[in-house]
Image (spheres, rainbow, N blue to C red):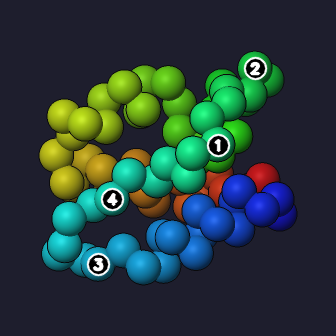
């Protein structure tokens, strides 16, 4: 597992069930051409673009996907 994946997984463990949902961005903003995912936060361009207007439940669903993607990295 790479260091970005480890950092993302550590960040995911601190999420509160009812609190505000923080961005998964870790300021490593490079898109991997092969996977279509950001190398830092494992989001797609669509997920990154939609994040600011997304409802908290949608953000939590994205976080669940990111955790799975990071584990596979």
Count of numbered tags? 4
Are the residues tagged 2 and 3 within 8 Å (C-beta)? Answer: no
Classify mark 2: residues with Cα within 10 Å, few (<14), some (14-19) or many (20+).
few
Q: Residue furthest right?
A: 1
Q: In front: mark 4 or mark 3?
A: 4
Are the residues tagged 1 and 2 within 8 Å (C-beta)? Answer: no
Q: Position of residue 69 (x, y in %)?
A: 64, 51
Q: In front: mark 3 or mark 1?
A: 1
- Considering the numbered disc 3 on the image, is that residue within a helix, a strand or a loop? loop
The residue that appears at 17% across and 75% down in the rendered structure is 18
Q: In this figure, which residue is indicated by the disc labeled 2?
A: 33
Real-space Cα separation, disc 1 to disc 4, in angstroms: 16 Å
Real-space Cα separation, disc 4 to disc 3, in angstroms: 10 Å
Q: In front: mark 2 or mark 4?
A: 4
Q: In front: mark 1 or mark 2?
A: 1
Q: Position of residue 29 (x, y in %)?
A: 61, 35
The residue that appears at 48% across and 79% down in the rendered structure is 13
Q: Give the mark, 2 or 4, whose residue is nearer the N terminus.
A: 4
Real-space Cα separation, disc 3 to disc 1, in angstroms: 24 Å
- Considering the numbered disc 2 on the image, is that residue within a helix, a strand or a loop? loop
Q: Which mark is residue 12?
A: none
Q: In this figure, which residue is indicated by the disc labeled 1?
A: 28
Quarter of image, res 38: top right
Q: In this figure, which residue is indicated by the disc labeled 3?
A: 16
The residue that appears at 19% across and 34% down in the rendered structure is 53
Q: Give the mark, 3 or 1, whose residue is nearer the N terminus.
A: 3
Are the residues tagged 1 and 4 within 8 Å (C-beta)? Answer: no
Quarter of image, res 1: bottom right
Classify mark 4: residues with Cα within 10 Å, few (<14), some (14-19) or many (20+).
some
Q: In this figure, which residue is indicated by the disc labeled 4?
A: 22
């Amino acid at each position: 597992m790479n260091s970005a994946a480890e950092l993302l997984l550590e960040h995911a463990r601190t999420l509160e069930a009812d609190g505000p949902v923080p961005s998964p961005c870790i300021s490593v903003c490079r898109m991997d051409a092969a996977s279509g995912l950001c190398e830092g936060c494992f989001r797609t361009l669509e997920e990154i673009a939609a994040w600011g207007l997304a409802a908290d439940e949608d953000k939590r669903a994205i976080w669940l996907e990111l955790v799975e993607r990071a584990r596979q990295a």
